[in-house]
Image: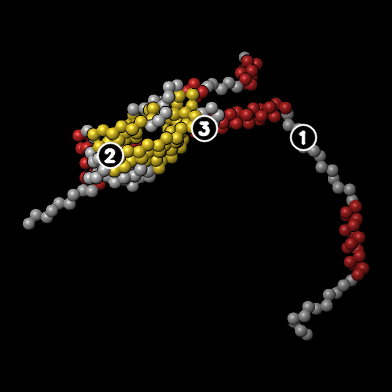
Amino acid sequence: MALKTIIRKATPKELEEARKRQEKKNPKTEQPKE
Amino acid sequence: MNENIAPPAKLDIDERIAEIEKFLEEQEKPKPVEMPPQEAPVEDVITLLKKITENQETDRVRYERSNPVENDDPIYDWAEATIDPGQMVQFIYTVPEGRAFFFEYLNVVHNIDTTYYIWIDGVYQPTLSYALQDFGDHAQIYKPPKMAYNKVDVWCLNNWVAPQTYATFFRGFNRWYRAIHRKIIYESLIKQEEQET
């Protein structure tokens, strides 16, 4: 039995989750208001 | 008197001879005979042997649960793919029918900004997935091995700005499914029960 490989486009939901994870890992620092 | 020189020993030969004679007399005396250990009753010996065999059987079962034994098929496989950002690669191992897959080892290439998903029999495994992520260890040893009856999926989502290459290696063994459910019967215990009733 060989390992089957499928390449597909990530769904918007998956991308959203990945983006959220990224933000959690590296939170954006707020710019000080002048 | 020089302190560095030992004083002359006072030797009395008669005393010395008396000591040696006493020692020889003690040696010649008959020693008390050590009795051999008494034999344990036969019933106790039989119960002990039964306990030993049953312990061996439980040990063997425990060993068989985590390690390949005779007639098991070792499984090694590897695949790789290069994907663009925003793409997902799915590595899928399908377990042959009638077999149980014992999943021992998984190694996935660790790339930047990647989300890993592991599915066993169509069930998402969060803890296994998070263990691979970020600062996790990309070589996972499952001890005791994870079991799968249908398929094992490893998904990688490339969330970086450039294409990245992913490779997966895994190891395990396949066992004929029916062998897991073999029943162990202790004939000695059955006979004992029959005698008691």
Q: Along the polypeptide, which appears first: circle 2 or circle 1?
A: 1
User: Callout 1: helix, strand or loop?
Assistant: loop
Residue drawn where x is 89% and y is 48% of the image: B30
Pick whichever of labels 3 and 1 is earlier in the sequence: 1
**Quarter holding residue B195:** top right
Q: Residue at x 9, y 54 (%)?
A: A33
Q: Is residue B3 or residue A28 the one in the foreground?
A: A28
Where is mark 1, residue-wise?
B38
Q: Quadrant of residue A8?
A: top left
Q: Which chain does the residue under circle 2 lie in?
A: B
Q: Which residue corresponds to mark 2?
A: B83
Camera-side mark, 2 or 3: 2
Q: Which residue is mark 3?
A: B68
Specify the quadrant of the image occupied by residue A7. top left
Q: Is residue B177 left or right of residue B160?
A: right
Q: Quadrant of the N terminus of chain B?
A: bottom right
